[in-house]
């Protein structure tokens, strides 16, 4: 028995969309004043609509009897008579028509205001959802970005966030329409209980019949939302790798990939349209059949007069339209809730991944140095949104300990996969160490204000991170102040990037997507200039020369030499010529530091570093760039190698 009651309760809550409202309340940020205003507008609209309908009956009765105002026992006529008496209004057809038209006119004004305000509320909800998603994504740890691609995140921010506003308005409209139907029913009840019961029975039958199709539309909607999310990820990925697509002549298969998805969504869209059409073709005949049955009852059973019958026909027409609107709103709620659910799910994953929290100590300068003590780190298992394993976890750093004095030049070298880049991410708290300590000036890295710590680290990667914007706007991105012309020129000179002044538009030259209009070396030097303009106490360069020609690499090396002793420099490098003059070199292998010392010391040790260095001696026409530097650095090492 208890189970039956629970099932009945769940059915009612789902059928009336109460459950949808509960889910929406958890997932959508709506202000109380917005809800109150929308409800108030809906109630006013409903009242005016009901009043306009009610005042139609006296007009019809007056036209039929020419003396309708004398009809006794009619609650509508009684109210009208009192109103006209108070305001000394003569009872005639013109005045009755004006009284009936006034609430209809006011209703349309309220409808316009409601439409305008609903659009504003929907837009604000979407903006709040979008900013919440962005805020959560920006705070998320890198593991979240490994799980969700750029396209998926863009889809959440731009598309799914908009659905939250639409979902809320659909719910409000659903209940306001239901309230309007209740007003119509109340008017019918006053006119005839039997007619009202027939109408309610027909309406309930229509809602039950259409429920199955609405549930199927909901299932389609969930599928579409998920597949669209996947497609966004694929399209953005392909657009970012458009040069690879062209070079491999993959235009046809890539077009086929998009075409197949488009047809897949096409067929799903047709199925959803068919379901919607089924709702319409089943509900409309049922409602019309109910209307005809009601008319028969009005005439043959109740014996109503023509004015009452005309009004009932009009009310039945309105109820028919409103039940169709309710079905449409139910579809909209079901469709939008799929997007809202995925939005909430993605934001939840991002929020859950955010395990790095800011400390309270300000960080502006490195005075003593950076110390790592027995630091270890492992990548966790990464799962796709559907729960399948994306990548298995692995141990990356094992018992890492070293000290980098302030103002020194430290370099980490080793083959790919040794853990060098992960180590740099730990230094900027992009990731959190599993165990051990990272100290800045003898304070735990966790004690410092996170934003200040990261802004104090100038970071240059293998591929300079540049926007599709002007040179100047790329230089000042995140700077926090407007630099002087001298500061900009000094940074560009220091990075050997003064070539930008020779461009036709100078600093206003647009770089193109990811700086595509410039060579790799030019992009790196612009990126280094931005780092120098920031004037941070710590400079981190992650493979800054691995993709550069020897000339561009030479510029980067000269820039580092000028900065040596002025900033704490940490460089990760495959190409060892860049770091030969480092104060301390750390050789990493399989997540461990296996050698440390200066270039000369490590060459003389003739172990891993010496072998790495020997393997990189590139000789062209008898002249090797790295070999020349090697010869100058250590004649003894040259002999040993």
Image (tube, rainbow, N blue to C red):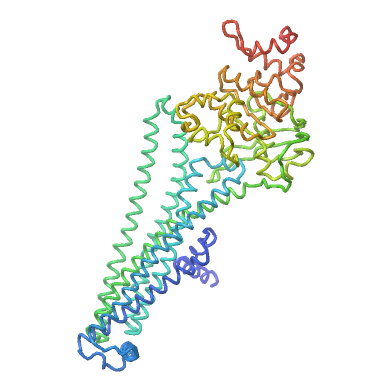
Residue at the farthest top position: 622
Tally the marks.
0
Q: Quadrant of residue 42?
A: bottom left
- Work out whether 310 lies above or below 329: below
Camera-side residue: 200 or 43?
43
Examine the rendering and report whether any part of residue 251 can be seen.
yes
The spot of residue 251 in percent (x, y) is 38, 30
User: As drawn, is 348 to the left or to the right of 77?
Assistant: right
- Residue 598 percent location from the top left of the image: 75, 20
Q: Is residue 568 above or below residue 200?
A: above
In the rendered structure, the answer to whether residue 448 lies left or right of residue 545 reads: right
Q: Percent position (x, y) of residue 208? A: 38, 67
Q: Would you place residue 53 above or below residue 154 in this image?
A: below
- The residue drawn where x is 29% and y is 69% is 286
Task: Identify the image quadrant of residue 278.
Answer: bottom left
601 or 418, which lies in front? 601
Of residues 449 and 637, the one nearer the viewer is 449
Residue 406 picture quarter: top right
Where residue 29 appears, as percent x and y from the top left, is 53, 59
Quadrant position of the C terminus in the picture:
top right
Q: Is residue 528 visible?
A: no
Please state if 505 lies on the left or on the right of 289 as rendered.
right
């Amino acid at each position: 028995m208890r189970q039956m009651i629970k099932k009945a309760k769940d059915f009612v809550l789902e059928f009336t969309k109460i459950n949808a409202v509960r889910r929406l309340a958890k997932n959508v940020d709506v202000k109380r004043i917005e809800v109150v205003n929308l409800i108030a507008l809906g109630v006013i609209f409903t009242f005016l609509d009901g009043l306009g309908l009610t005042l139609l009956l006296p007009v019809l009765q007056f036209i039929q009897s020419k003396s309708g105002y004398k009809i006794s026992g009619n609650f509508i006529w009684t109210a009208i008579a009192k109103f006209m008496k108070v305001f000394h209004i003569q009872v005639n057809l013109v005045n009755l028509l004006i009284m009936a038209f006034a609430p209809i006119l006011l209703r349309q004004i309220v409808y316009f205001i409601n439409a305008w305000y609903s659009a504003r509320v929907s837009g604000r909800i979407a903006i709040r959802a979008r900013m919440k998603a962005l805020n959560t994504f920006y705070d998320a740890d890198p593991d979240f970005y490994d799980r969700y691609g750029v396209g998926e995140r863009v889809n959440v921010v731009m598309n799914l966030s908009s659905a939250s506003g639409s979902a809320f308005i659909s719910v409000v409209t659903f209940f306001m329409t239901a309230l309007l139907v209740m007003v119509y029913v109340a008017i019918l009840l006053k006119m005839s209980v039997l007619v009202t019961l027939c109408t309610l029975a027909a309406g309930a039958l229509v809602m039950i019949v259409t429920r199955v199709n609405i549930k199927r539309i909901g299932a389609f909607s969930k599928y579409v939302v998920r597949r669209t999310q996947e497609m966004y990820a694929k399209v953005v990925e392909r657009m970012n790798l458009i040069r690879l697509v062209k070079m491999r002549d993959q235009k046809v298969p890539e077009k086929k990939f998009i075409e197949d998805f488009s047809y897949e969504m096409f067929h799903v869209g047709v199925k959803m349209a068919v379901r919607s059409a089924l709702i319409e073709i089943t509900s409309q005949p049922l409602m019309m059949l109910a209307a005809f049955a009601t008319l028969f009852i009005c005439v043959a059973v109740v014996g109503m007069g023509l004015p009452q019958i005309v009004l009932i026909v009009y009310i039945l027409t309105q109820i028919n339209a409103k039940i169709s609107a309710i079905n449409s709103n139910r579809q909209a709620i079901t469709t939008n809730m799929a997007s809202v659910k995925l939005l909430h799910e993605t934001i939840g994953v991002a929020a859950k991944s955010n395990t790095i929290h800011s400390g309270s100590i300000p960080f502006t300068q490195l005075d003593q140095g950076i110390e790592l003590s027995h630091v270890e780190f492992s990548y966790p298992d990464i799962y796709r949104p559907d729960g399948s394993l994306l990548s298995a976890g692995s141990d990356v750093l094992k018992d890492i300990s070293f000290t980098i004095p302030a103002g020194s030049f430290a370099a980490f070298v080793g083959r790919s996969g040794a853990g060098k880049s992960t180590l740099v991410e730990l230094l900027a708290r992009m990731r959190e160490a599993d165990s051990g300590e990272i100290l800045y000036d003898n304070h735990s890295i966790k004690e410092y204000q996170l934003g200040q710590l990261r802004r104090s680290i100038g970071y240059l990667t293998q591929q300079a991170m540049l926007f599709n914007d002007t040179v100047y706007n790329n230089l000042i991105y995140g700077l926090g102040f407007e630099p002087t012309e001298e500061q900009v020129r000094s940074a560009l000179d220091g990075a050997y990037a003064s070539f930008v002044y020779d461009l036709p538009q100078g600093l206003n030259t647009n770089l193109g997507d990811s700086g595509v209009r410039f060579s790799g070396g030019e992009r790196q030097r612009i990126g280094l200039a931005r780092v120098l303009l920031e004037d941070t106490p710590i400079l981190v360069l992650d493979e800054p020369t691995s993709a550069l020609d020897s000339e561009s690499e030479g510029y980067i090396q000269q820039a580092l030499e000028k900065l040596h002793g002025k900033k704490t420099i940490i460089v990760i490098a495959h190409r060892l010529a860049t770091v030969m003059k480092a104060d301390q070199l750390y050789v990493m292998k399989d997540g461990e530091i296996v050698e440390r010392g200066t270039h000369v010391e490590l060459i003389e040790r003739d172990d891993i570093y010496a072998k790495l260095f020997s393997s990189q001696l590139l000789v062209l026409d008898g002249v090797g760039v790295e070999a020349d530097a090697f010869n100058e650095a250590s004649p003894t090492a040259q002999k040993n190698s």
